[in-house]
C-alpha cells in the first residue's frame, strides 16, 4: 500500500469519526469557591475555601469573555461536550493536514504531465486562425 493509499484511508477514517461527533460546547469549565462575607459563617474561618464549588463555563465570543453558570448536576454532561468540541477541533486539523498532503501529491503527479497547452494563459479552445474584426473609427 502506497503513501497515497494510506493518506486516503486515514482521510476516510477521519470522515467517519466526524460523522460520530456528538454534542459539543467550546470553553473551559472551572470550579469556584467564594466567601459570603458573614462573620459567623463557616466560610469565614481561617483556611476555609468558602462556599462551593459553583461551576462556570468560560469562552471567548467576538473578542469578549463570556461566562455561563453551569448547575452542578450538568457538570459531567458539560465536560463531555467540551471533550467532543476538542475532539472535533483535533479531527478537523488532522483532516486538513491529510488533505493537504493528498493535494500536494496530486500536484507532483500533475507536474510530470505538464504540456504546453496547460501553461498559464493557454486556452483549450482550438485556434480559428482569424482575428476578430475591429471597429474602424474615422
Image: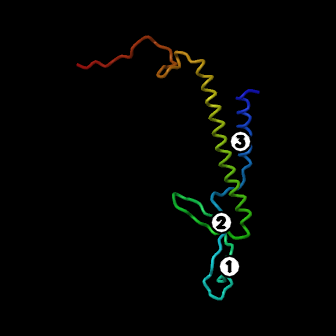
The residue depicted at 64 percent of the width and 83 percent of the height is 44
Real-space CA distance between mark 3 and mark 2, rounded to the nearest whole angstrom: 32 Å
Please tell me which residue is depicted at 69% across the width and 70% down the height of the picture. 71
When asked about the image quadrant of residue 108, the answer is top right
Q: Earlier in the sequence, mark 3 or mark 2?
A: 3
Secondary structure of the residue carrying tag 2 is strand
**On screen, 68 above or below 37?**
above
Label for residue 30?
Answer: 2
Residue sitting nearer the eye, 107 or 120: 107
Local SS, label 1: loop
Most distant residue in the right direction:
1
- Secondary structure beneath label 3: helix
Label 2 and label 1: CA atoms lie apart by 19 Å
Of the numbered discs 2 and 1, the one sitting upstream in the chain is 2
Front residue of 12/108: it is 108
State the residue lying farthest toward the left.
138
Q: How many marks?
A: 3
Residue 15: assigned label: 3
* Nearer the camera: disc 2 or disc 1: 1
Amino acid at each position: 500500500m502506497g503513501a497515497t493509499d494510506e493518506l486516503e484511508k486515514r482521510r476516510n477514517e477521519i470522515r467517519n469519526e466526524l460523522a460520530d461527533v456528538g454534542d459539543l460546547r467550546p470553553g473551559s469549565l472551572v470550579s469556584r469557591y467564594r466567601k459570603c462575607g458573614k462573620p459567623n459563617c463557616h466560610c469565614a474561618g481561617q483556611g476555609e475555601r468558602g462556599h462551593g464549588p459553583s461551576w462556570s463555563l468560560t469562552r471567548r465570543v467576538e473578542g469578549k469573555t463570556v461566562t455561563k453558570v453551569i448547575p452542578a448536576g450538568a457538570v459531567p454532561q458539560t465536560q463531555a461536550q467540551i471533550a467532543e468540541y476538542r475532539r472535533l477541533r483535533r479531527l478537523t486539523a488532522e483532516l486538513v493536514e491529510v488533505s493537504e498532503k493528498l493535494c500536494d501529491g496530486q500536484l507532483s503527479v500533475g507536474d510530470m504531465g505538464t504540456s504546453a497547452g496547460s501553461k498559464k494563459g493557454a486556452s483549450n479552445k482550438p485556434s480559428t486562425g482569424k482575428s476578430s474584426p475591429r471597429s474602424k473609427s474615422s
